[in-house]
Image (cartoon, rainbow, N blue to C red):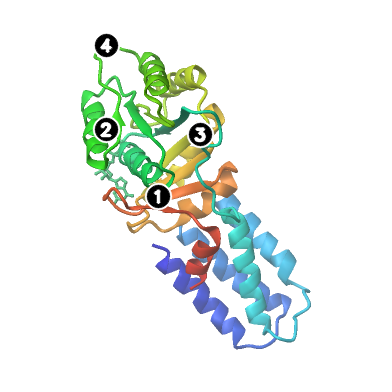
Amino acid sequence: MFDGLSQKLSGILDSLTRRGALSEDDVNTALREVRRALLEADVALEVVRSFTDRVRSRAVGAEVVKSVTPGQMVVKIVHDELVAMLGSEAEVIDLNTAPPVAILMVGLQGSGKTTTTAKIAKRLTDKSKSKVLLASLDTRRPAAMEQLAVLGKQVGVDTLPIVAGQSAVQIAKRAHEAAKLGGYDVIMLDTAGRVTVDEALMTEVAEVKAATNPHEILLVADALTGQDAVNTARAFDDRLGVTGIVLTRMDGDARGGAALSMRAVTGKPVKLVGTGEKIDALEEFHPARVANRILG
Ligand code: GDP
């Protein structure tokens, strides 16, 4: 998915590498191209600006060590700054509290929230050997509740039985009781989505948050929607204080901007990325690997 950006950046920086001397002009020429490539990848303008400023201030006047060419040095600075922008370390889902640990899944309808909930449940079951209980809080869309039940069955994870007529908060509380009685380690609460961020959605999710005291609030956002995904993340974070982001559809032809801007704009880590419709198409987000892929 980063192919376009990666090729552009490496093309520009390769030509710089061959020139052998690093002047302020060289840095600025390279940065003009870096800036263009990032904007084409749909990275938020404010992020592009602060990124190129940071690279410039480190690159211009920097003493070039003998073992590398000036060009390689710029590549390294761009790489380091990309890693810093992406969040430095891979972040994992934090289960480090008394069970049952509540994970609240939030996001817009169609972002891949329900699928991602099942993917994470499977991952926690397989890798952390956690006993997970799934519950859908989407009271307006019975089909969404059914979908979670079907996915739960598919991955061999229990789902809270559906009881018609309960509110989202009532379901969340019932899930907590059931998890305590059943000795579950983790409860994953799949909240309702809406087509856009609206007040009714935010109020409902805020009420569920207040009632469940979740240890993680994971925002699921569609990478294909670029800067809209970043704006959505900011809106959810402002209102709810998310603890991490899952970017879906990273297998698609997204230009990469969402992945690059998320951390810088929201200050919250991308913890996982969805890379396909299949239930095991979920990967950890490793900033250094992503930066390597971008630079090629
Ligand atoms: P929700 O409305 O947010 O709960 O979205 P769903 O979980 O129902 O997902 C909507 C569609 O997106 C489904 O067809 C999923 O299979 C698909 N989907 C979810 N995550 C990914 C992903 O990472 N890559 C791809 N290609 N499709 C995905």
Q: Quadrant of residue 147?
A: top left
| Residue bearing mark 1 | 223
* Image location (x, y in percent) of residue 127: 41, 48
Q: Report the disc number at residue 148.
A: 2
| Residue bearing mark 4 | 165
The span from disc 1 to disc 4 (Cα, nearest Å) is 34 Å
| Residue bearing mark 3 | 216
Figure check: 126 above or below 136: below
Give the side of residue 46 with respect to residue 216, left or right.
right
1 or 3: tag closer to the N-terminus: 3
The span from disc 3 to disc 2 (Cα, nearest Å) is 19 Å
* Image location (x, y in percent) of residue 19: 63, 88
Pointer 3 and pointer 2: residues touching (CB < 8 Å)?
Answer: no
Residue situated in front as seen by the camera: 157 or 172: 157
- Residue 42 in view (yes/no): no
Q: Assign a secondary structure to mark 3.
A: strand
